[in-house]
Amino acid sequence: MRQLDSKTCLITGGAGSIGLASAKVFLQEGARVMLVDLHEDSLHEALTSLTADGVPPERIATRAADVSVARDVEACFEATSERWGKIDVIFSNAGNAGAIGPIASYPEEVFDDVYRVHVKGAFLACKYGVPRMNDGGSIVITSSVVGLMGSPGPYAYVTAKHAQVGLMRSVAKELAPRRIRVNTIHPGPTENRFQADIERHLSGILGRDATAFLDELIPLHRHAQPEEIARAVLFLASDQSSFVTGATLAVDGGMTA
């Protein structure tokens, strides 16, 4: 039996590399998936990719939304439950990178924008998703390796990723009586466009190739592939992790060991 057979799942940041890789794994495991992302064109590309893999159209849908806007988030969950019934898995994965710089000159508007997407976005996903969830479901929030440690420079991103852990732990305790598990996943540097953009900027600050620099910090000496993160998300989403809640799962090649 497939691990998510007939389960209904909603993924924010669904058109990005980790979101799309997770959608592919979820669909392979029998799920119905609502992909949520900010831009319609990105969602169209993601949908085209998934249906080209032979996914039946009745098991995949998309919806454009700003995850930091309550009415957008509520509408996504309403549309999902109207289409397929109650939700079993919420994967809150939307994010943005922000800036890297000294604390004294770090732009406040960037800090606010990053916090709004990561923290308020995850909060709203829980707020509007939980009332529409089946008991025994799972919520997974994408934090980061820097949600488990400090790092000078990306102040907004690091702060937001730590804040998501506090949200996760609190919601996990509230929802335990309903057997809804809530966990964060903490990817290390992952080979995708999001990380490549960060590393281009970081290379200028370091004065050397940031990809090579980060690989030196990772005991496995390489970046993750999106599919590797997706398989860890599947573990948290499925009954394979039936006694795991309130946990921080590092998928970072040993970076935080």
Image (cartoon, rainbow, N blue to C red):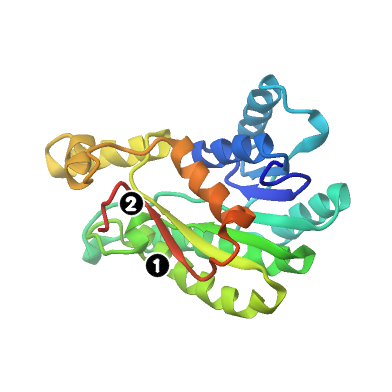
Residue under numbered circle 1: 162
Q: Secondary structure at mark 1?
A: helix
Residue 148 drawn at (x, y percent): 33, 64
Residue 67 drawn at (x, y percent): 62, 55
**Residue at x 55%, y 51% (from the top left corner):** 235
- Is residue 72 or residue 138 the one in the foreground? 138
Q: Residues within 10 Å of mark 1 (few under 14, many from 20)?
A: some
Q: Residue furthest front?
A: 1
Question: Which of the 4 quarters of the picture holds residue 222?
Answer: top left
Q: Residue furthest top?
A: 52
Residue 16 drawn at (x, y percent): 53, 38
Q: Amino acid at mark 2?
A: Ala
**Residue at x 21%, y 46% (from the top left corner):** 219
Q: Nearer the viewer, mark 1 or mark 2?
A: 1
How far apart marks 1 and 2 lie (CA) works out to: 17 Å
Picture disc at residue 99: 2
Residue 229 drawn at (x, y percent): 46, 44
Compared across the picture, whether 151 is left or right of 45 comes to left
**Quadrant housing the N terminus:** top right
Question: Which of the 4 quarters of the picture holds residue 176?
Answer: bottom right
- The tally of labels here is 2
Q: Amino acid at mark 1?
A: His
- Is residue 204 or residue 95 the one in the foreground? 95
**Residue at x 51%, y 42% (from the top left corner):** 230
